[in-house]
Image: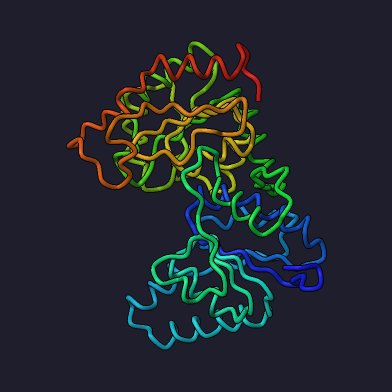
């Protein structure tokens, strides 16, 4: 793309998941620096939209109502489904995008790139047949220890300025006020993010309970659980074993959870989007990785990954340990607490 071909309307497609949206967010400022006068939009699913809506560098966040369509189809309301689909495609085409960046690289994201009508469609490691819908595919890089390395690679391949390639999550005034009010009522607090959709990514409940007590007594912080509605039962079990825990699991929007993270004194979490937000907001963060290892280099002096590599790791979606999850069991409470103390440099500050 030369200066004479500068796009005027650009669409980024990263539909999900929350952590990947966070790690792809540096592309916003990189594109804005290169194309300051372009209209910049992002297509995303509802779950992660709250992390993008208040970004001043984005002109528009377009939300794909996937769950709504599924409900219409399940209810056999086919005409309503078709009408909504038609209108959504029309919305995309009416924007007259010149350039689409499909940074998810799946068939579902490639389909939206093609349906947008954009003449230039660049996919990052497009698979599942998505490459056939692209005008150009940029291969994903080999394994890189850096957080968000694939998006940095894409930026460099596109000739964007990647000097300051930091995650870029902006919050609205109401969410900031909510977090400040919460902190005023709770006192200094630490965020714990124990919950994911895959059991092999979990740490153990007894250790979370021990860590919560350690954080409370050693650092004088109130440990606060964050997570989605599906984790309420697990959160209740943790609170039963550690009464010092306070739970906001399933009780806040994603944007408000992000604000709570931003104003926390520290964060400990497994491989989940909320943990990556701790790094994005430069909060002292300890990430516990085992079956997955999305990165080892956090790019932050106050963020550290604890990861004990085994011959079978990272096994990702195919654990071979029969549910022992030895890679996570090797992470001890003392190691986590001591790492937190190191990152916080002996003081409890944001």
Q: Report the quarter where the C terminus lies.
A: top right
User: Hey, which quadrant is residue 76 in on the image?
Assistant: bottom left
| x and y percentages locating residue 298 in the rendered image | 56, 34
Residue most extreme to the bottom: 79
Measuring 45% from the left and 71% from the top, which residue is drawn there?
130
Q: Left or right: 331 with respect to 84?
A: left
| x and y percentages locating residue 233 in the rendered image | 32, 40
Q: Nearer the viewer, residue 213 or 7?
A: 7
Q: Classify 94 as above or below 137.
A: below
Q: Classify 183 as above or below 198.
A: above
| x and y percentages locating residue 64 in the rendered image | 52, 69
Measuring 57% from the left and 47% from the top, which residue is drawn there?
23
Q: Left or right: 106 with respect to 11?
A: left
Q: Is residue 347 visible?
A: yes
Q: Nearer the viewer, residue 316 or 346?
A: 316
Q: Classify 342 as above or below 253.
A: above
Q: Nearer the viewer, residue 266 or 304?
A: 304
Q: Is residue 46 visible?
A: no
| x and y percentages locating residue 235 in the rendered image | 37, 35
User: Hey, which quadrant is residue 128 in on the image?
Assistant: bottom left
Q: Classify 228 as above or below 279.
A: below
Q: Left or right: 155 with respect to 253?
A: right
Tally the numbered discs.
0
Q: Report the quarter where the N terminus lies.
A: bottom right
Measuring 68% from the left and 69% from the top, which residue is drawn there?
10
Residue most extreme to the left: 322
Measuring 72% from the left and 72% from the top, which residue is drawn there?
9
Q: Nearer the viewer, residue 220 or 346?
A: 346
């Amino acid at each position: 793309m030369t200066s004479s071909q500068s796009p005027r309307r650009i669409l980024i497609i990263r539909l999900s998941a929350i952590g990947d949206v966070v790690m792809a967010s540096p592309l916003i400022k990189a594109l804005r620096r290169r194309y300051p006068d372009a209209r910049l939009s992002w297509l995303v699913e509802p779950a992660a939209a709250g992390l993008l809506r208040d970004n001043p560098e984005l002109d528009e966040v377009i939300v794909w109502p996937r769950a709504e369509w599924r409900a219409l189809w399940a209810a056999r309301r086919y005409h309503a489904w078709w009408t909504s689909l038609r209108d959504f495609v029309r919305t995309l085409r009416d924007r007259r995008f010149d350039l689409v960046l499909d940074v998810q690289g799946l068939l579902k994201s490639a389909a939206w790139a093609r349906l947008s009508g954009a003449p230039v469609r660049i996919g990052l490691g497009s698979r599942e047949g998505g490459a056939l819908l692209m005008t150009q595919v940029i291969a994903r890089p080999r394994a890189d220890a850096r957080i968000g390395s694939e998006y940095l690679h894409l930026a460099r391949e596109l000739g964007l300025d990647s000097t300051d390639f930091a995650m870029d999550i902006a919050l609205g005034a109401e969410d900031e006020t909510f977090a400040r009010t919460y902190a005023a009522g709770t006192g200094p607090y630490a965020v714990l993010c124990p919950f994911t959709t895959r059991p092999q990514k979990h740490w153990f409940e007894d250790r979370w309970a021990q860590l919560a007590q350690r954080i409370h007594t050693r650092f004088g912080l109130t440990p606060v659980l964050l997570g989605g509605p599906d984790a309420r039962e697990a959160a209740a079990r943790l609170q039963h074993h550690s009464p010092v825990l306070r739970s906001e699991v399933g009780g806040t929007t994603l944007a408000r959870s992000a604000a709570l993270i931003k104003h926390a004194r520290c964060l400990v979490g497994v491989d989940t989007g909320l943990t990556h937000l701790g790094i994005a907001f430069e909060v002292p963060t300890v990430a516990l990785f085992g079956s997955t290892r999305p990165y080892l280099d956090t790019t932050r002096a106050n963020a550290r990954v604890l990861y004990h590599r085994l011959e079978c790791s990272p096994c990702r979606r195919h654990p071979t340990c029969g549910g022992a999850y030895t890679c996570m069991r090797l992470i001890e409470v003392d190691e986590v607490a001591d790492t937190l103390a190191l990152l916080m440099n002996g003081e409890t500050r944001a």
